[in-house]
Image (cartoon, rainbow, N blue to C red):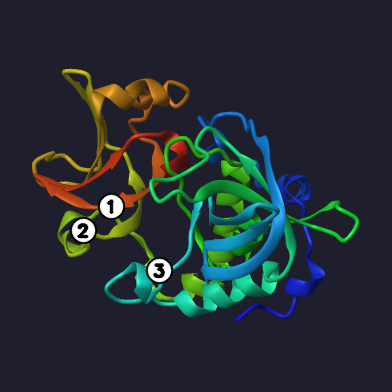
Amino acid sequence: MLSQDTSQIRLTRRATIASVLAAGFVMGNAKGFPPVDLSAGETGRVIRIIDGDSFVMALKDGELAVRLSAIQAPRTRQRSDKAWPFSEEAKAGLKALIGGRTVRLSYGKTKRDRFGRAVAQVQTLTPEGQDDLWVQGEMIRLGLARVYSWRGETADMGALYALETIARDRQRGIWADEFYAVRAPDPDPLAQYVDSLQIVEGVITSVADVRGRVYLNFGSDYKTDFTIAIARKNVRAFEAIAPLTLTGARVRVRGWVEMINGPMIWMDHPGRLELLA
């Protein structure tokens, strides 16, 4: 359920970012994220909540299904074989924030997903049509979702990660459940999470460029230890981060864990990698 202070905080995207920066969260994890360049989208009234990160809005010429870009709420049973912890709380939280409200969409490079849903940053509006609440930021702040972007999605990633850090440190919502814990890069325990989405934090011990493919290693034996891999076709997207210079850096990565030699997470864009101070 929503915390008691929810109704007291109505932050626009700009105000949310400003408050995060004022609190001292000018962290290294903003490095490498592209500048925010959003285009105006549709405005309409929310008529149905699907789950914690998607809903349906009414337009003049019909309805539009929307997915909140750059975040991921716990999956409900209709989207997974088994509902994830806090899935109903996240759905109820999104309903409390936007149910029946008028919202405005803003788009990055990707405007529709493979299911035809709009993929957008979402802002609620006051009755006078002014910006009221940045929905992504508030869901993250309340611990009802975690940051999770797809390539082509544009958001204030530094601000979202800072809000997530605060929520996790205070064990709000999902962060009180071991299901969503940040994992260490130890290969044996991590192997039990193969074929699941995990957040892994550790220090990069070595980097390698193998025929254009980049590997960020977290141990001395690449055949067994945890590794982040970047395919050759995606390396250019990481130019601002310069991955081949990251030996010794502490990072936090999120993605699906595969078993290729040791546990591995593939990355195709820098939005899923935090460079930690």
Describe the element under mark 3 as helix, strand or loop. Answer: loop
Q: Residue at x 56, y 72 (%)?
A: 172
Closer-to-camera residue (103/222): 103
Kind of residue sitting beneath label 2? Asp
Counting from the top left corner in percent of width and height, residue 250 is at: 40, 42
Amino acid marked by disc 3: Arg
- Label 2, label 3: how many angstroms apart (C-alpha)? 15 Å
Which residue is the site of mark 3? 75
Tag 2 near tag 3, CB within 8 Å: no
Query: Residue 213, labelled with which disc?
Result: none
Residue appearing at x 55%, y 50% in the figure = 161
Amino acid under label 1? Trp
Residue occupied by mark 1: 256
Decide: few, some or many residues near mark 2? Use Cα within 10 Å; few <14, some 14-19, many ≥20: few
Disc 3: CA contacts within 10 A as few (<14), some (14-19) or many (>=20)? many
Proximity of marks 2 and 1: CB atoms separated by less than 8 Å: yes
Residue 244 coordinates in the image, percent (x, y): 32, 23
> Dividing the picture into quarters, in which one does residue 77 lie?
bottom left
At x 52%, y 62%, the residue is 53
Residue extending furthest toward the front: 61
Residue in front for this viewpoint, 169 or 271: 271
Gap in angstroms between the C-alphas marked 3 and 1: 15 Å
- Judging by the rendered image, the residue that carries numbered circle 2 is 195
Q: Residue at x 21, y 58 (%)?
A: 195
Q: Give the camera-side residue of 5 and 185.
A: 5
Q: Earlier in the sequence, mark 3 or mark 1?
A: 3
Q: Nearer the viewer, residue 68 or 40?
A: 40
Q: Is residue 52 left or right of residue 262?
A: right
Instruction: Provide residue 64's location: percent of width, then percent of height.
Output: 57, 55
Numbered circles on residues, count: 3
